[in-house]
């Protein structure tokens, strides 16, 4: 990927993360995907050098950088050969903690974030439900006030890293939908202990065809008790807070998609130079050149959209004239464009006479 135009800080992030990721070979990631073994070693290596808190406040042990730098980190992880497996082992600890850093009280931040930054805790993100999907405003998980605690009941699905997480950023309805004026009201945000041995919590791993290095899960709550102090901000105001994390997530996912696409193009171009047919490398044929060049240009365009969105997200923290809906449009657009560009790049990279070799490598991502 062409690095011209990135800030000095972003280039340092790229070089530093690439150095860490170089210690994890393609064989390492293939083994993790085949066995379903979590990539604890990558998480530990990143935590050791302070990268888990890349976008969290310095006074809590973080790096105090932005989502622009965090996106570069996740793209570099993905592009190194770790793919989505490596990125998913990290990214919830980056985006899901953004609402906590912004909306929690100073005391809550001191209690909730330092151990996560040090890598001693891991967090998962509890929003998606089986019967609501993208319709977040109609999620059914409830948190009912009971004295100095809440009783949580409901179901979440496709929760990544729940098998290893000790904390969860949870969105639940504290006021029934029929009792609010707008669907966006009555949802509350919590940062909770995710104690799989406690009564009322059941975590079930979902079997997957690929991407097995990081677990995906169904989570069932049945009167699972959480303290009132775990609620972030005012009761019923959680939806706007969770969007703050989701917009960050979209930037990170866009970066991860770019990493996949650039990695695929690099592998395809290398093989096209080495594979000789009828006395010359197949990369000299336009039938090979043009699809790869077209894919690369689409990745470059998606890269601009991605880092524009990340920059806008960061600037909106300091500039109140930037409306949040503009940030949302940019972040959603970036995720879509990067995903489309990456899919096309990977698809074209496994076509032609070298598809068997590349397919073997790409299935490890």
Image (cartoon, rainbow, N blue to C red):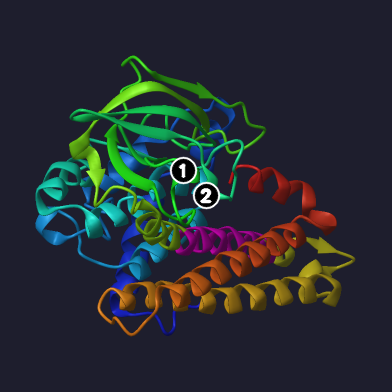
Q: Which of the two residues, 151 or 166, is positioned nearer the viewer here?
A: 151
The residue that appears at 40% across and 54% down in the rendered structure is 239
Can residue 1 be spotted in the picture? no
User: Residue 127 — which label?
Assistant: 1
Expressed as whole percent of the image width and height from the top left, the position of residue 332 reads 54, 67
Image x and y of residue 315, in percent: 32, 78
Q: Position of residue 235 (x, y in %)?
A: 29, 47
Which one is earlier in the sequence, the residue at label 2 or at label 1? 1
Left of 44 or right of it: where is 63? left
| Disc 2 element | helix
Q: Which residue is mark 2?
A: 136
- Determine the residue positioned at 60% across, 79% down: 301
Q: Is residue 52 above or below residue 166?
A: below
Question: Image point 59% across, 67% down: which residue?
Answer: 338
| Residue 323 screen position, x and y as percent | 39, 78
The answer to whether residue 98 is visible is: yes
């Amino acid at each position: 990927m062409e690095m011209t135009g990135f800030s000095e800080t972003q280039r340092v992030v790229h070089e530093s993360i690439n150095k860490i990721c170089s210690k994890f070979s393609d064989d390492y990631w293939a083994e993790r995907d085949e066995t379903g073994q979590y990539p604890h070693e990558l998480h530990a290596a990143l935590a050791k050098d302070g990268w888990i808190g890349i976008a969290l406040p310095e006074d809590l042990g973080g790096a105090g950088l932005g989502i622009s730098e965090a996106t570069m980190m996740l793209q570099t992880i993905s592009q190194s050969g770790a793919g989505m497996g490596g990125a998913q082992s990290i990214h919830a600890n980056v985006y899901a903690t953004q609402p906590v850093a912004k909306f929690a009280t100073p005391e809550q931040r001191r209690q909730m974030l330092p151990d996560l930054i040090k890598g001693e805790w891991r967090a998962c993100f509890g929003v998606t439900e089986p019967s609501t999907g993208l319709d977040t405003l109609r999620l059914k998980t409830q948190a009912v006030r009971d004295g100095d605690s809440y009783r949580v009941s409901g179901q979440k699905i496709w929760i990544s890293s729940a098998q290893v997480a000790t904390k969860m950023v949870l969105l639940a309805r504290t006021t029934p939908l029929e009792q609010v004026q707008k669907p966006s009201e009555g949802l509350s945000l919590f940062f909770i202990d995710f104690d799989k041995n406690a009564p009322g919590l059941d975590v079930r791993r979902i079997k997957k065809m690929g991407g097995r290095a990081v677990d995906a899960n169904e989570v069932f709550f049945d009167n699972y008790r959480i303290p009132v102090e775990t609620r972030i901000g005012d009761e019923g105001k959680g939806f706007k807070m969770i969007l703050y994390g989701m917009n960050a997530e979209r930037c990170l996912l866009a970066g991860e998609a770019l990493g996949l696409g650039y990695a695929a193009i690099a592998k395809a171009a290398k093989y096209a130079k080495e594979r000789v047919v009828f006395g010359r490398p197949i990369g000299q044929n336009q039938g090979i050149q043009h699809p790869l060049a077209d894919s690369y240009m689409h990745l470059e365009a998606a890269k601009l959209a991605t880092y524009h969105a990340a920059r806008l997200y960061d600037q909106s923290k300091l500039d109140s004239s930037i409306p949040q809906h503009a940030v949302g449009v940019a972040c959603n657009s970036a995720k879509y464009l990067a995903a489309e560009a990456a899919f096309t790049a990977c698809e074209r990279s496994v076509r032609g006479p070298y598809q068997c070799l590349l397919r073997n490598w790409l299935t490890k991502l």
